[in-house]
Amino acid sequence: MSKGVVDVSYTALDECRTRIHVASKDFALEEILKVSQSKTPAEVTPPDLFGKLDGAGDLAAKISATWTAVRVELGSAQRRLENVERALDEVETNLRKAATASGA
């Protein structure tokens, strides 16, 4: 009959948390651009970048909107991974408290 003891590998939890931490940093736009050796795009793409091209304003607005969407999505992914990292830390903390309370 089980005594309610949970067999937990704290090393595995720590390894998972560490990998998630590293992965979350991979979603920082600045890091992505540094690795690709690209320049950080401007917040707003200036229409005159395209010279006298008809529709330059619309094109610049769409480029700006695309970069905004990329920034938002990468930021969201990074925050979600950071939340998972914190949750794993809480799980480990709670498991350790429960083990201590049970005398395990």
Image: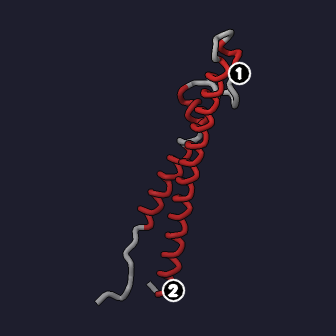
Q: Residue at x 48, y 75 (%)?
A: 95
Residue at position x 47%, y 81% in the image: 99
Q: Is residue 85 above or below residue 63?
A: below
Res 71 → quadrant: top right
Residue at image x 28%, y 90%? 1
Query: Residue type at mark 2?
Result: Ala
Q: Position of residue 85 (x, y in %)?
A: 53, 58
Residue position marked by numbered label 1 in the rendering: 46
Residue underneath mark 2: 101
The picture quadrant where one finds residue 63 is top right
Residue furthest to the top = 52
Counting other residues with Cα less than 10 Å from the Cα at mark 2, is it few (<14), some (14-19), or many (20 or more)? few
Instruction: Tell me the amino acid under the disc marked 1.
Output: Pro
* Image position of 47 (left or right of 16): right
Location of residue 47 (image quadrant): top right
Helix, strand or loop status at disc 2 = helix
